[in-house]
């Protein structure tokens, strides 16, 4: 149920990213010598602002140029250039799939807020890399999803990237974001197999649990439920 709720939320982000991708690629094809102005322009800013109401979970919608600078966002215009390393990975990839990056983000009204960035590569002629469309979602949003099942006792939940990087664990007093599942964990095999269950010795807190793994369809994320073993 949680995996489906997460997938539906991410699907709405994906739809917005696809629309931005198409718009910028079309404008860039029409004016290939004016790409930087298209990325930074006020009319593009207004276009991004019109997308924001469709994403109640979004903190910002924006564009990054090919150098990894966030050059246009819904937070303000003109936008001060902010460096984000997400462009580095997408610049070497020909794919259009949604990717994510978790990091501390210093915005105009928030200092050091924890944000998950979803993104899509923007291509020019001959698949040249022009930049990235991004949607930033505060980590708190995913915490609210997991809070909906807070009444279930002796359970905890994780949202992870498929490479094993932890985005969020709930409930947990310790910030786990950025930690990784151990390479020897059965979790990696089950993600590749489409999900399943296993017994965990308790990688993060030393407490043995039963674990259910559910990869999100079409996205590089996985939901993980941990059930504390009943003591007799």
Image (cartoon, rainbow, N blue to C red):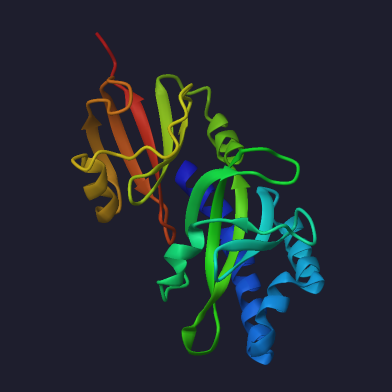
Residue 14: image x %, image y %?
A: 56, 63
| Image point (25%, 47%), residue name | 188
On the image, the x and y values in percent for residue 76 come to 79, 55
Image location (x, y in percent) of residue 52: 73, 58
In x, y percent, where is residue 185?
21, 39
2 over 17 or under it: above or below: above
Report the residue at 68% width, 53% height from top: 60
- Taking the view exactly as shown, the residue that stands out farthest to the left is 184
User: What residue is at 58 percent from the left and 52 percent from the top?
Assistant: 9
Specify the farthest residue to the top. Answer: 232
Give the left or right position of residue 229, taking residue 139 as reference.
Answer: left
Q: Quadrant of residue 41?
A: bottom right
Number of labelled discs? 0
Question: Is residue 33 shown above or below 41?
Answer: below
Q: Is residue 2 above or below residue 38?
A: above
The reply to whether residue 1 is visible in this rendering is no
Residue at x 69% of width, y 46% of height = 107
Asked where in the image residue 165 lies, by quadrant, the reply is top left
Say which quadrant the C terminus sits in: top left
* 1 horizontally vs 65: left or right: left
Nearer to the camera, 130 or 148: 130
Side (left or right) of 75 relative to 67: right
Query: Which quadrant of the structure image shows residue 114?
Result: top right
């Amino acid at each position: 149920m949680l995996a489906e709720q997460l997938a539906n939320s991410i699907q709405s982000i994906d739809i917005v990213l696809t629309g931005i991708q198409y718009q910028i690629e079309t404008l860039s094809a029409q004016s290939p010598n004016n790409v930087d102005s298209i990325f930074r322009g006020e009319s593009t800013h207004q276009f991004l602002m019109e997308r924001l109401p469709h994403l109640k979970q979004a903190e910002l919608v924006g564009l990054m140029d090919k150098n990894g600078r966030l050059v246009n966002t819904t937070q303000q215009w003109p936008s001060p250039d902010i460096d984000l390393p997400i462009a580095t990975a997408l610049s070497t990839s020909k794919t259009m799939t949604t990717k994510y990056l978790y990091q501390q983000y210093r915005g105009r009204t928030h200092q050091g807020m924890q944000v998950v960035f979803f993104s899509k590569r923007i291509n020019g002629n001959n698949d040249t890399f022009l930049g990235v469309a991004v949607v930033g979602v505060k980590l708190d949003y995913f915490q609210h999803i997991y809070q909906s099942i807070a009444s279930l006792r002796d359970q905890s939940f994780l949202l992870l990237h498929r490479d094993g990087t932890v985005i969020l664990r709930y409930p947990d007093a310790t910030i786990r974001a950025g930690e990784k599942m151990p390479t020897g964990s059965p979790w990696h095999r089950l993600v590749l197999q489409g999900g399943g269950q296993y017994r965990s010795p308790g990688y993060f807190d030393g407490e043995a649990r039963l674990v259910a793994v559910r990869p999100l369809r079409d996205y590089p994320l996985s939901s993980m439920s941990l059930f504390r073993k009943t003591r007799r």
